[in-house]
Image: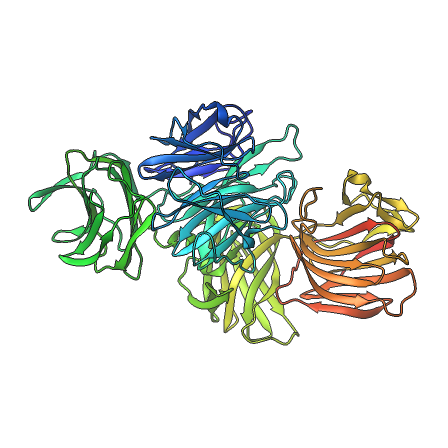
Amino acid sequence: MRTYKNPFLLENQWSEQELGDPFLMRFNGYYYLYCSSAGNYIKAWRSEDLVNYTYLGSVCDEPEIEGAYAPEVCYFKGKFYMITSPKGSGHYLLKSDRPEGPFHLISRNYGLMIDGSFFIDDDGSQYMLRAGHHGIVAHRMPEADTIDVNGSTIPESYLNYWTEGPMIIKRKGLYYLTYTGNHLHSKGYRVAYSISAKAPDQGYVNLRDNTLLLETGDEFHALGHSSSFLAPDLDSYYIAYHSFKLDANPRGRGMNIDRLFFNGARMYANPIWWEQEQPAMPDFYQWGSDGLRDIMLGKQQYYFTPVSTEEHYTAELSVNTNGDSLSLLYGYEGASYGEIILNKNGSFAIYEMGETRAEGRINDAVSFGYYITIRIARDNRGLMEIYLNNLLLASYNTVLGKGAIGIRKQDKLEIGFLGISAMVGGSGDKLAAKAIPGKFDAVHCKEEVSRYSLHDKGFEISAARLKAGDQLTFRVNVKEEGLYRIYTRVIFHKQWIDLDLSCGGRKASLHYQTSQTLEDGIFQTVEAGVVSLTAGIQDLSVTVLTDDLILDTLQFIKYAQVSDQNVVSDGRLTTDHIRIFGHKGFKSMISKYSGFTCAENFGRAFLGEEGWSDYRVLALVNRNTKATGDVSVYLRASRASWFPHQVTASLFGYRFKITVEGIYLYRCSYGEELIGYYAFYHEQQTRTKLEFLAEGSRITLFLQGEAVLTHYDPQAYLYGKVGLEANGEGFGFEEFNIRSLSD
């Protein structure tokens, strides 16, 4: 098993450790990598397998592009177009005959901020996307060398602060727009996505959880500015992004590559910064015609692959006809085959045993004087899809299955890459290793399971419909040996869930029982139990012991035992196990006349581990009689970050905000949603005794020993740290203690 490890360290990286804003383009079976420049030229690398790279040198030496931000390249009408923003000062368009360059300027500076990205739709229409103050902005491109400066903002792509690094991929009729938010120097720099079924520049929605990449730990953090691309297996997708070593000296950005998974409209990824499997290559691949079979059909001579496809497959051929038409055969077994005819006049026709399957016009994005990449994908239902240069040409039902791939011989023909893969329609997602810690979908087990359709914003996603005795097997990649909490998102019709788990020779029985009234058809997130896992890539099996169970996701979080902690006593900090954030670093929270509070306008602190689950927090709060500030208590805070220039609520979890007039309860997800409020109608005391309880799916606030605010969340945040915060003056903590529950 071949492995690699993020982040990459490539030959000739900037400053030997800097590779920011990585962009990967697939062309003729190779991957071309470009990144932000620190000098007056743009570096590039080439790879066959996404792991091993050859340095190509500079692809552009134009003086106007010094300090080029985020160069990206597209292939259109046989030419390569680059967009880049030198030192963040507007955009230039450049053009080349080869992906290796040299690229030359073809435009004046368009302005339009930073992070330009191309997208070409199936009809050949072209778009440019870029960063904007209120979300990603999309611009039409009437020609490959022309941008309409009057763009439109995509409001769903806004991350509550500066948003950048856009890119679109189109898969199964859906547009997936990825983008990055917060600040480059924040550990909470993150990648999110929106989807549309309508158009590249409109109709977008955000699913229930649209965060794609986020890590804020000490060893791996600040993940952003991504690009997504077809994988070497010709079917799956990977995502490249940079991480930023913000705690290192000197700081540096490094490129990372991880697998994307798809489940209907849902797209997800888990960052892996330990050893992982290399991306799978096609079952058969080569460059050029050497080794191909030479067969005469009628009066025409053809090259044929020495191997046949499987019944369900993806095949790809890159070929330059140098201006001639092209005939391509698939499913060849004797007299049985299909034929794809691409005419240089722009028409096409597809036949199977003499019968027409599809015909029409080829869009203008494809040029017959240069390389054309044809991809053929046949799924297990018999649906055949034909792509030219990654743009959908035709879709139809086929009667053909496995067979060889053939290309008609022509004098001017130049054969580039040719590959055949048994993967199609995302089938490899069931076999690829899933990260632990991490979250993955139940339908991505090795077995074929009965599916339950759930809908999110009108888009379909599949969960697994299970009965007692069903077994699910997942290939997993466990970061380190130890105990892990398992969280499941389920619909269950009984009051309990029973599962048996086996992994790496270790076994566990998992049981969850609830006294809560179950709502029919409503998913709930619950903790199924704690398991011991060994490190490494291995199979994990789950046996279902409960009938009529619908399982959406499984999530594994490193276990941590809640410990009693006395944090603040008599207004003074009494523990060293605390991390304090703010403009003054650790001194952002100090002891003052109002208790333990912010030194100057703002201070925030966290205690414990993200693997904590159920606990109670006891606090004695000093409240001012006027609205000069406030304090907050955070429960189950995870993925938290702080930086002066980012969205304030940069975490997942719950926040109780105590003000002069009442207590507000927010649900935080790198933004805030008000979910509860208690008003101080009769309480005159400025010293307020509070208790906060996180137990299962219920969050409860007690005032002077009485429950005054309760929130039940079926999609609860079930793990995370304890936090405290102070703003302004006159508010602070006189006492603050953490107490464990039975774990």
Q: Nearer the viewer, residue 713 or 152?
A: 152
- Residue shown at 79%/40% (left/top)? 586
Residue 674 vs residue 525: left or right?
right
Q: Which of 205 and 63 is in front in this view?
A: 63
The percent coordinates of residue 245 (x first, y second) are 62, 35
- Residue shown at 87%/58% (left/top)? 620
Q: Residue 531 falls in which quadrant of the image?
A: bottom right
In the displayed structure, 299 sits above or below 18; it is: below
Q: Which of 644 and 521 is in front in this view?
A: 644
Q: Does residue 743 appear in this view?
A: no
In the displayed structure, 305 sits above or below 719; it is: above
Count all numbered tags in the image, as a single digit. 0
Residue 688 vs residue 94: left or right?
right
In the displayed structure, 108 sits above or below 426; it is: above
- Residue shown at 57%/75% (left/top)? 494
The percent coordinates of residue 700 (x first, y second) are 75, 66
Q: Which of 492 and 546 is in front in this view?
A: 492
Q: Does residue 294 appear in this view?
A: yes
The percent coordinates of residue 564 (x first, y second) are 79, 54
The percent coordinates of residue 444 (x first, y second) are 45, 57
**Image quadrant in which the C terminus is located:** bottom right
